[in-house]
Structure formats: structure tokens, C-alpha cells
Image (cartoon, grey):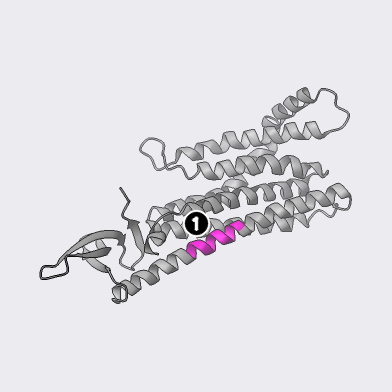
Amino acid sequence: MSQGLFRNRRTLAILNVAAVGLALAATTAAAFRALLSGQEIVWVTAAPTLVLGTLWAALLRWRRTVGRSTFRVAWLFSIPLAMVNAAVAGGLLFLSEPGRADRLMNFLMGMVLGATFGAIFWVPALLVTLVCFGLPIAHGQRLAKQGLAGGERGEQWVGVMSAVMALVAVGLSLYHPDWSNRGGQDALWALRALAGLGGASGLLAALLAGRREALRRAFVADVEAGKVEHFRVDATPEGKALVRVVSVAEHYRVADFTEEVAAMDREGAVVRHREEP
């Protein structure tokens, strides 16, 4: 049980990457549907945003920085990814228009217009994305530098903000009343499905992160109270440390083998666990 508490946060990361991508796709599609007419705008904006938004959320977890600064390399991908997103959406929009013979040429023309003249849309959209999603992710990354406890608080923050933005997408879907025809109903339910999945993923990630932190604190408290065998909390010059104790040759000569499991702060929150060789 203790090993599971101190390692492997991959599930949380996957849930939050999915939550950001889904919520971003739903919010983008809902915003463009509120601004523009036509049901196809939901499909052509949601599909590329789902793929590229999820990729963006995954890249932002890359820890490499620019030179000796604290600015992560992955943040530089925000502009080209936003441009590619607008280009693909523009290409799909031109492709969806009836009566155009050369489909490939129409798609390429739409991509060019989406990446250039479409900047009137994708530049403000990028700024809103960075405010609504980028800032929570950056805040979560700053918390993660505090160690395991901070990392899980960061995952909670990102998960909750993704759920909030998914709820905003549902609210935006109510703004435009023209969902009456069959195509409109399909687009509406697809949009709400994206928002629902994004909100559920974000809330689940937040709940799992909170649960892990609560279990870890309870485990450490039980160790300090002497309720857990083979573990103890030692004071070190760097702070408290959770130590595993294994007794060897329990006869007339006794030797204890100790292994540090995790370092903790003054409040008992785990900030670093011992990496396996």
C-alpha cells in the first residue's frame, strides 16, 4: 500500500491531459458556434482542437527549459500549434462547403486562409486559452516543484479548472438557440459530450489527487503514532524522513537495516520519495 501512495502519478497525468484536451475542444467549438452560423463550425473546430489541444497539454508536461531560465521549451509550441489548429479548421470548413469541385485545392486554400487571415480568430483564442488553461497548468507546475504533495495539489488545480471550463462550454452552447434541425442536434450533443467527458476527467483527476494526498498523510500520521510496523519517522538535517526498518537475525544479535522511503516537510507532507534503482 505504501509503495502505491508514493509512486506512479501517471494515471493523474493522463486524466488531466485528456481533461484539458476535451474541455478545450468543447469550449472552442461552443465559442465559435455562438459567434458564427452553421452547424459545421462545431465539427471543424472541435476535431482539430481535440487532437492538437491534447498534444499541447501533454507537451506542457515536458520539463526541459530554455537555456538556464525557468521558461519551459514546451510553451514555445503554443503559437505554432494554435496556427496549425486554425489552418486545419479552415481547411475542413472549406472542404465542408457544397458545390466545390477540387476538394484538395479547397482544403489547402482553407488552410492558408485559416493560418493567415484566420489570425483574427486564433490569436485572441490563443490568449484566452493561455489564460483559462495555460495559467492553471503553469500554477500546477509551480506547485509540483514543491514535491509530491505540491504536484498533487497542482493536478487538483488543473482538474478543477478543466471541469470549470467544460461547464462554461455547456453554458455557451445554450447561448445560440438555433439547434433545431437534425444537424444542429447532432452537433449540440457532440459538443456536450466533449464537455461532459472533459469535466468528468478533470473532476476524477482532482478527486484522485486529493485522495492520494489524504491517504499519504494518514499513513505518515499512523507511522508517527507507532501504529505501522517496520516504518518510522526520523528527524534529519533536511527535515523529517519516512524510513522503512527491516530487522535482520532476530536472535542474540540484532541488526536493523533502514531505508529512507520519503522526505517530508515540517507539516508532514511528502516532498520527495526515494527513487528505485
Residue 164, percent across and down? 62, 59
Q: Main secondary structure of the magenta part?
A: helix
Query: Taking 215 as reference, is 57 above or below it?
Result: above
- Residue 141 locus on image (x, y percent): 45, 51
> Which residue appears at 57% of the width and 46% of the height?
130
Residue at position x 63%, y 39% in the image? 123
Question: Which residue bears the numbered disc 1?
Answer: 155
Residue 91 covered by magenta stretch: no
Q: Residues within 10 Å of mark 1 (few under 14, many from 20)?
A: many
Between 32 and 261, the residue placed more toward the observer is 261
Quarter holding the N terminus is bottom left
Quarter-of-image position of residue 47: top right
- What residue span does the magenta drawing correspond to? 201-210
Residue at left 14%, top 70%?
Answer: 251
Establish if 125 lies above or below 203: above
Q: Residue at x 48, y 50 (%)?
A: 138
Q: Secondary structure at mark 1?
A: helix
Q: Is residue 183 above or below residue 258?
A: above
Q: 215 or 256, which lies in front?
A: 256
In the rendered image, the residue lying farthest to the left is 252
x and y percentages locating residue 63 in the rendered image: 42, 43
Residue 91: percent from left, percent from top: 73, 31
Q: Hey, what amino acid is under mark 1?
A: Glu
Residue 245: image quadrant is: bottom left
Count of residue discs: 1
Q: Nearer the viewer, residue 95 or 109?
A: 95
Quadrant in which residue 122 is drawn: top right
251 displayed left or right of 131 = left
Residue 202 part of the magenta-drawn span: yes
Q: Is residue 275 left or right of residue 34?
A: left
